[in-house]
Image (cartoon, rainbow, N blue to C red):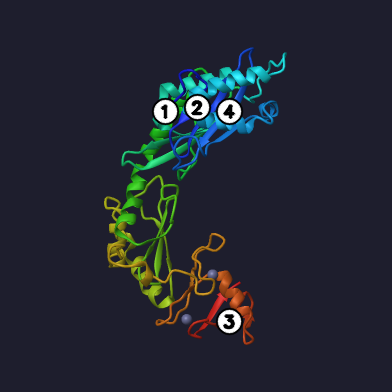
Amino acid sequence: MALEAFPLIVHDGGTPESWTGLVDVGHGTFFTVSITVPEGSEGFGRSALKCDARLMELVQGSQELLQLRLVQSGSVTAFLHEFRAYVLRVLPAGTDSTTSSRSPSHFADIVREIDGLGWQYVTQIEADMSSVELKVSDLSERMHKIRIKIPQGYPNIPPTVVTSLPTEMKLRWFAHSGSLKSILRQFQDVLQDFNGLWSELAEFDQRAWVLEPTEDMWSGIMRRVAITANTSIQVILDAAHPRALPECHLLGPDHTVAPLRERFNASASTWNAKKQVIDNLESILGMTFMSPAEVDAESLSVECGICYSYKLDGKIPEKVCDDRRCGRPFHQSCLVEWIRALPETRQSFDTLFGECPYCSTRLHVRL
Ligand SMILES: [Zn+2]
Ligand SMILES: [Zn+2]
């Protein structure tokens, strides 16, 4: 929300709380100023005052005094009045251009647009209004963010958007009618399109033990779900047809994966696109997925037995020891490194032969 006395200063009540924007010191001169109050602090004692480089030069030697005045003034508006008066005193005659990379009228236009849109949607805003981030909830109250990069020359030059949706959002833009509001509406429409996909994914999250992803749950089309302690299935949905037979990969030791694969292949034709994906999978595999309520994380050995981490360079431990009593998972690259270091290792073409670091069962790994 813009301050009444300083319409180009925007207050963001989130954490950290901040006031950011332009201060008009008259004669067509504007300076960018931002005040940030860190989380959990009362008053302005630990607040940070920042302004643009040219203004910093002008107030050199007085930063501490300004900071002190900010603490003592008790309100940002009161401080900014004082700050403006101070800057006017130290400002050399003839200073007349704005120091912001964006013109004040551009800034004011964007503030007006956000006023029309509603500040409740804004999660982040650049001090020079070059980008604005909005958050919007979908039909099931899941939150999604969209970052709008506003170029110089907006609205004649179209803005660009970055979202965390499973597919890229194509913005329709008409210079004469384009606005932040129109972007918000388009984003809401796109969110509706994904609702079917997200309902399917959410069902996995509720009923199964999801190993992957662990964050950004709505930006992808994949879930990897535990079947046993060291066997899992990776399910990749079709964003356009979320209830269609998905691409599936079984991961784990041969003795558990082989029968599951056989069952899957034998029954895949019974896939019923009217039912939910997870129900179809359970009936095809002839099992019920482990629910997070019934199984604790300890019993799932999902970390690599060599480096003890789950993700390594973005990869998960996909190679599993075939011994039934062991069944340790390893990263491909960790296992290659381990086997290479063994004196008795053999290599034939692109395959290394060695032993499991835990149970000494013979195993091989592709290079
Ligand atoms: Zn590893
Ligand atoms: Zn083993």
Q: Nearer the viewer, mark 1 or mark 4?
A: 4
The spot of residue 157 in percent (x, y) is: 58, 24
Q: Going from the N terminus, do you reach mark 2 or mark 1 first?
A: 2
Q: Which residue is mark 4?
A: 33
Tell me which corner region of the image, top left, top right, bottom left or bottom right, holds residue 117: top left
Task: Give the secondary structure at mark 1.
Answer: helix
Relative to 202, say whether 20 is above or below: above
Ligand 1 image position (quadrant): bottom right
The residue closer to the viewer here, 55 or 254, is: 55
The residue closer to the viewer here, 234 or 311, is: 311
Q: From mark 2 to mark 1, how far is it between C-alphas?
A: 26 Å
Q: Residue at x 60, y 17 (%)?
A: 25
Disc 3 marks which amino acid? Phe
Residues at discs 4 and 2 in contact (Cβ within 8 Å) = no
Q: Which residue is mark 3?
A: 353
Residues at discs 2 and 1 in contact (Cβ within 8 Å) = no
Residues at discs 2 and 3 in contact (Cβ within 8 Å) = no
Q: Going from the N terminus, do you reach mark 3 or mark 1 first?
A: 1
Q: Going from the N terminus, do you reach mark 4 or mark 3 first?
A: 4
Disc 3 Cβ-to-ligand 2 distance below 8 Å: no
Q: Residue at x 47, y 78 (%)?
A: 321
Q: From mark 1 to mark 4, how far is it between C-alphas?
A: 20 Å
